[in-house]
Image (cartoon, rainbow, N blue to C red):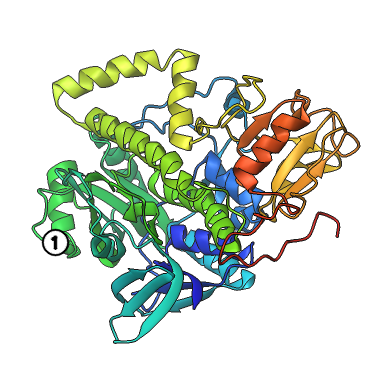
Amino acid sequence: MRDVVIVGAGPTGLMLAGELRLHGVDVLVLDREPEPTPVVRALGLHVRSIEVLDQRGLLERFLTHGRTYPPGGFFAGITRPLPDGPEGLHTAHGYVLGIPQPVVDRLLAEHAIEAGAEIRRGTELAEIVQHDDGVIVGLADGSRLDARYVVGCDGGRSTVRRRLGVEFPGEPTRVETLIGELAVTADPETVAAVMARVRRTQLRFGLGPLGDGYFRVVVPAAAVAPDRATPPTLEEFRTQLRAVAGTDFGVHSPRWLSRFGDATRLAEHYRVGRVLLAGDAAHVHPPVGGQGLNLGIQDAFNLGWKLAAEIGGWAPAGLLDSYETERRPVAAAVLDNTRAQMLLLDTDPGPQAVRRLLTELMGFDEVNRYLIGKVVAIDIRYDCPDDSGDGSDLLGRRLRDLPVGDGHLYGLMHAGRGLLLDRTGELSVDGWGDRVDHLTPGDLGPDAPDHPAVLLRPDGHVVWVGPDDAGLRMALSRWFGAPLDSPHRFGEGGRGAPGKRRGQ
């Protein structure tokens, strides 16, 4: 029996596979397509996703294949300079990483395989049947697999979600956009001039150079296609380019053509028994702001250590359910901000008046910082009980990367363990040393948080701030389960194999 079968080898499923393998979980990733898709649905990574990669030691390989850009213009394409520059976002990574989704997929797949995950392509899910001890995964070729858990990361048309019977309420596509990579015969000066003219009013239009005469072309469709799974034709592109821009730029020889809509839907549940949903299988929304791929990667980052804890037998009660209670509100907020952005892209006079007003409001630093923080996902605060009564504003928030000793904070989190930053030198994680690392005053530098002690979950969110050992032990039990010396240390079915402490 497999520990976890992940359905879908996109960025969410691959990120989750790598996270689970950090904890020794046996992982199989299935994908119905025989080869990775060449379609470039997303173009980059936002601040929080970049931080996530840094927390797992993956950032350098991504930086090698991407380009960094200053943040800005995320919210409905309204460009305002960032207050105080990149430092105004309170991150060590105040930039956007431009990197095409197929490259993201490839790098995450390489990482998952290096970590020991198996990826099986050309394998289609047919059914899932749950029982008390696991899940039977039926495949289209008639074979079956047994797993302890299944995670559906198989996109907006998720087979897993449909087989579970989970409702997916929201709004259907009302506005459709064509996208593709095509060769262009028009000279660069003509392309630039037409772009500048058309984008004064139509921000759902654009041509971005890719080299060798090819461009990424985006143009509004004439209407919503009856069968949205069918790619558009070259002639559709030519017709719509002429209608919107007055020229078709001589487009020809497409590498790929696709379409996307503005459907906005959120799954009623992220978990049904031993089956969970993540990424687009749990939420779909318009691509404005470039949040979709990032939201899925961050879902996986939240879920990975919790599911590993459940399988390992040390998860406290309710930990796995906290995946839904934490991540579903985040997705709901993204759905709302993309709804608002789509309205601001409408060319009618009313929405344009609202756009002009919001542009003025973004001249206020706090408004600008707030809206950018929503899109790049550094404003997320999970609901964490205050076990110390400290009342710190850090609780529930991710801690930014900081210099620690001779290195940096995120460099200490590559193994996916909890971390106690202890300025007092008087606290202890005894009993939880297989799950939590402990840094004492000799390990910390002057830039560590100005609090007696801070406890981080494996995803870098602060779950306790304070000076007292009693409050710390409550927080450790709440997030990391029973201590090793407890008779309830390992739940039924858990492995009972403690990990190593740092330095062992």
Q: Is residue 103 visible?
A: no
Q: Nearer the viewer, residue 119 or 480?
A: 480
Q: Is residue 128 above or below residue 467?
A: below
Q: Percent position (x, y) of residue 52?
A: 59, 47
Q: Is residue 221 above or below residue 367?
A: below
User: What's the amino acid at mark 1?
Assistant: Glu
* Residue found at x 61% / y 73%: 116
Q: Percent position (x, y) of residue 332?
A: 33, 37
Q: Quadrant where the C terminus lies?
A: bottom right
Figure quadrant of residue 259? bottom left
* Residue found at x 69% / y 54%: 414
Figure quadrant of residue 403? top right
Answer with left or right where residue 293 lies relative to residue 427: left
Label 1, secondary structure: give it: helix
Residue that lies at the very extreme toward the right in this rendered image: 442
Q: Is residue 293 visible?
A: yes
Q: Percent position (x, y) of residue 243?
A: 12, 45
- How many C-alpha atoms fall within 10 Å of the one at disc 1: few (<14), some, or many (≥20)? few
Q: Nearer the viewer, residue 250 or 268?
A: 268
The residue at which mark 1 appears reads as 235
Q: Percent position (x, y) of residue 317?
A: 53, 48
Answer with left or right where residue 355 lies relative to residue 483: left
